[in-house]
Image (tube, grey):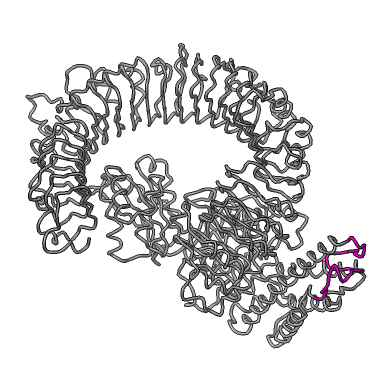
Amino acid sequence: MAVGEILSSTFLQVLFEKLASLGSDYAQGGGALPFSRISIDLLNKWTKMLVVINSVLGDAEDKQVSNKGPVKLWLDDVRDLAYDMEDFLDEFTIVATQAKSKAESSMSGGLVKWKCPFVSQHISSISNPNPCSLVSQTEVRKISNRLEEIITRKAHLSLIENAVNKSDYTDKRLPSSSLPEPQFFGREKEEAELFDLLIGEAENVDTTLSIVPIVGMGGVGKTALAQRLYNDVRVSRYFERRAWVCVSDVFNVLDITKTILRSITKVSNEGEDLNGLQVKLKDTLSGKKFLVVLDDVWNENYGEWTALLKPFEAGAKGSKIIITTRNDTVELSLDNCTSLLAFHALKTTNFERHPNLETIGKKIGEKCKGSPLAAKVLGGLLRNKGNPDQWEAILKNKMWDLPTGETDDVIRVLKLSYVHLPSYLKRCFLYCAVFPKDYEIERDEIVHLWIAEGFLDGGRSKENTLETGRTHFNELVSRSFLQQSSVDASKFLMHDLLNDLAKSIASGICFNSESQLAGNEDDVSLEKVRYASFTSLWSVTSKCMRAYHRMKVLRSLILLPYRSHKYCQFHMSNKVLHDLLTKLKYLRAFSLCHYSIIEVPNCVGDLKHLRYLNFSFTNIERLPESIGGLCKLQALILKGCQRLSMLPQGITKLVSLQFLDIRDTMSLKEMPSSVYNLKNLTILSKFLVGLDKGSQLKELKNLPHLQGELFISELQKVKEVRDAVDADLIGKRGLTNLFLHWGENFGNLRNGMREARVLHSLQPHTNLEHLSISYYVGPRFPSWLDGPSYSKIISLCLQDCPNVTSLPSLGQLPSLRELSLKGLHAVSMIGPRFYGGKSPFSSLTTLTLEEMLAWKDWSHPIGGREEDVPFSCLQHLVVRRCHSLVGALPGQLDFLMKLEIHSCPQLNNSTSVVYLPSLCELYLNDCNKEILKTLVNLTSLTVLKIENLTELVCVDNRFMSYLVKLKELYIGRCDKLNYLWQDGNEMLNLTCLQELTIKSCPQFTSFVAGEIETELPCNLEKMELSNCASLGKLPSKMYTLRDLTVHNCPKIMGLNILQDNPNNNNPISQLKYLSISKCDSLISFLVDKGRLASLKKLTIIACEGVESLEEIIAESLNYLAISTCENLVSISRFLHTLSHLTHLEIWECPKLQIEDFPPLPITLSTLQLTDCPKIKSLPDKWHHLTSLRWLEIVRCENIKCFPRGGLPPNL
């Protein structure tokens, strides 16, 4: 498909408007441009020729589908000319404006009188000594010649004027609301089967890891199916660790490993090599049941697969890896494809309400060839179209008649849908070709780029361009041209096939690279590229940028972090950046995020065409004053620039600036004076109140168009209440997120009464959705917060307001979903005024009450009527550090799913009970044990964590009887806990319990009261015991246990086994993962009689009494770590018999004497020896260790040399 579609009528419309504006300036100036030599006749001539070209564009775009030759070349030339004309006219406008400014600054002679940006009736030679320099006559002649040549060629192409373009009837803008959550068609059987594969245990008990492939051609819904499984709540609860990696066609073992590790640990681990990362990943997954999704895998190299999968062998039984990959044999049934088409076209899954469309709908469904992506995109094309003729036009489109072999059926469907896109969406969609596959971007980020490129200009200047762009974006999402990320809901991306389509259409003007550019700098085609991106791995060098230096007419340049490193910083020297910017005269958008640059070169001020400049998440400390010369700049994005200390004064000259994003700039302490000059600002994310004129709060009155988010800080500096009135927040209808922040220093200089009047005067418009008030020292909250006036408020945070004594009537805010009250130290009661009337907090789902030191009474509405019940939708309740609170929680919390109570020792000191039938997670910390008696009907509870419950000796029988679905139980820092259960029968209810942790309970002596045999719950797989100084024995029956950690329980001698029971010889036969530290006696018991025969991972740490590990028998062991055993003298001489061992490390064992290191198994891949001074040798037959890839020897001074025979071959 040719690039002509990029033109459309929208692009030429921009040129028409620029020429019309110039003609209007002629008229105002008396019909002459004396120092430009562009006559009005020439302007009219250009306009007429563009009209002729525009009249045949529709037919040309249609014909170039089947004619790849002359028509395509003609459209390419029209495209290039249109771009060059727009650049020329912009250049002229900029230079003329500068000339006007210079002339006005020289008005001392009174000789200058300007009537328009371009025209002067009287101008002295002093003010403009070379007036003809405003425009190059050569450039004017070139444009005229190119227009005439294109008109001449048009005549030989038999193009029809005013032919109906395929997108004409869709040009009317569709509603901006997105479709409901996508339905899932035709994969129910596969989903159920895959769910069973993920959750069901494998028949072979020795199988730790299973790989589950989802195979299909591009667009059949592999990723969507994997997403449903990955996000299924049952799956997320089943697996202890989860990670999602988009692999695509670049299969890099290091990057994939790093991404998985960061996804699980939230640590970047930058700079480490593959072996170090794999060791960490192996440790992280060891003994854990994990799920990893590798999405869109193309690689078939066995060696790379083997290298990638090594760390996963350490996981628990039941671990799974889902792989989505391509094949051309899987497709939806016709019925399911047609249902999906109907859903996206008609918002229903069938044609019952549209019988006149059913037959043709099924025929179109056949064209989709079983592809869900094709069905969704075609459905989006036909959305809200009830006329059968429109459906028939799609069915009979000649795109279906193209010869096969050029592409597959799905791409054909996507091309057809693109052809029928409204013209205002085509350029927006094609611009996305600048991004590499699988790149995720936020909505407003791409919208700002569209605005900078002028895609939203055509005839819509009176509209809010940001909202227009968001509407376009939502429409592309609803048509499935863009899709929401499965990892971050705030980001979006294109399906691979749509990315391919966009690149094929935009070839020649769009360029992106993954950093391998060395051979491309001489490519002639680069000279016509308009939009480009560069993806860096670590560092950007001059060599990398050579190709970009050739892109002389480049409009957009976006430097992107590599997918797996996007949270790190990359290096680019100031010289490389300077050299790059000086080559790109026509840049309209430049983005350099996540780079470690400290300064921005002055030459950035020479980019006169620049509309968008983004230095987010860099180390810049300030911007150059030259930035004030960017007269066209609309968006300046400095988000996350933590070192940015000031903004240049020149920024106030940017009269075109609409978007200034300075969120998360912690070092920024003041605004430049005269910020009120930026009258076109619509987004100002932060305003720091100053004391000096020009930076005071009242400057906001001159910014009437502000919308979205506004963070106002340093409000304690407001000296005149009138300034708050003048700020006129109530008049700023577009503000949705407002943060009012006073200084965090509560010194004596603060004036609470003045702050109260200021806050009262900062009343926002009722369109507000999110409000936060923090560090305010006034005695009361403003009256405007009372009642239901702010009906759109979704979240409200009142934080660290220590002098406020009462709360406003918040219960009547009908849309409020999240409420956070923190640090309100003077509030002593929450009562009827807080609720405000009937059905209080009818939409609230999350409530946080924290650090309210004086709060004693939480009274609840009394009455049997349903409308009197507060918090009817509450799902998450947090009460933290409210030390004086007495009484009970609200009695009816039927939908509460998560409850957290911390440091509230007097809460629930009553006989009232709280019914919690939906509660899934309960966290109790530093409370009275009596609270357990007041929480009833916990039949849905799956996670229970109890810490520091005073006086708790044993878990209450009645409370335990509710826990029929409990999966995780954690008890910690309960100083008086003696045992868990009064008798063994209580455990019979815990059939779902999988994890048990007991930490820092010094008086805990046994699991069940009395000296009886203890059988753990039947499905318990993981147990951790730590710092339980009185615990003498482990339970006698742990047949299902797979993972056991015991730390600092010095009295444990073994298991509580009756001597006359011969069946209890090995009650830990299923144990796979064992970690023991500071438990000397337990080591001796466990290594005896081959009890560790099934063990896969063994870690022994700080067991000072252990002198020998000669008797370890663990045939299945693959990981052995011994650390800080000060008296260990010897280890097993039979390590070579451990035929599965891959990892061996020994740390800080100063007495370990090894004259001749015992042979090691050939399976070993990692060997680490640290601080073992008495080890004198390495094993013989060293070169036989063909699997060894990592060797680390630190401070083992008696190892003098490597064994003979050479190093292991793969080290």
Main secondary structure type of the part rendered in magenta: loop
Q: Is residue 842 visible?
A: no
The answer to if 1186 sits in the magenta stretch is no
Judge whether 799 appears above or below 674 on screen. above
Task: Using the image, determine if residue 134 lies above or below residue 757.
Answer: below
Residue at 8% from the left image edge and 40% from the top image edge = 1111
Q: Report the magenta residues as a range.
A: 107-132
Give the residue at x 67% y 67%: 167
Q: Quadrant of residue 328?
A: bottom left
User: Looking at the rendering, in which quadrant would you find the N terminus?
Assistant: bottom right
In this rendering, the count of numbered labels is 0
Q: Nearer the viewer, residue 1207 or 920?
A: 1207
Residue 1003 placement, left or right of 874: left
In this view, 185 is above or below 708: below
Please identify the quadrant where the C terminus is shown.
bottom left
Residue 480 figure quarter: bottom right
Q: Residue drawn 62% across and 64% down?
A: 391
Q: Position of residue 874 (x, y in %)?
A: 53, 29
- In percent of width and height, residue 132 lies at 81, 76
Does residue 212 appear to the left or right of 36 in the view shown?
left
Query: 437 above or below 491?
Result: below
- Given residues 526 and 954, the one toward you in this image is 526
Q: Is residue 860 visible?
A: yes
Q: Position of residue 434 (x, y in %)?
A: 56, 65
Give residue 976's quadrant in the image: top left
**The stretch drawn in magenta includes residue 118:** yes
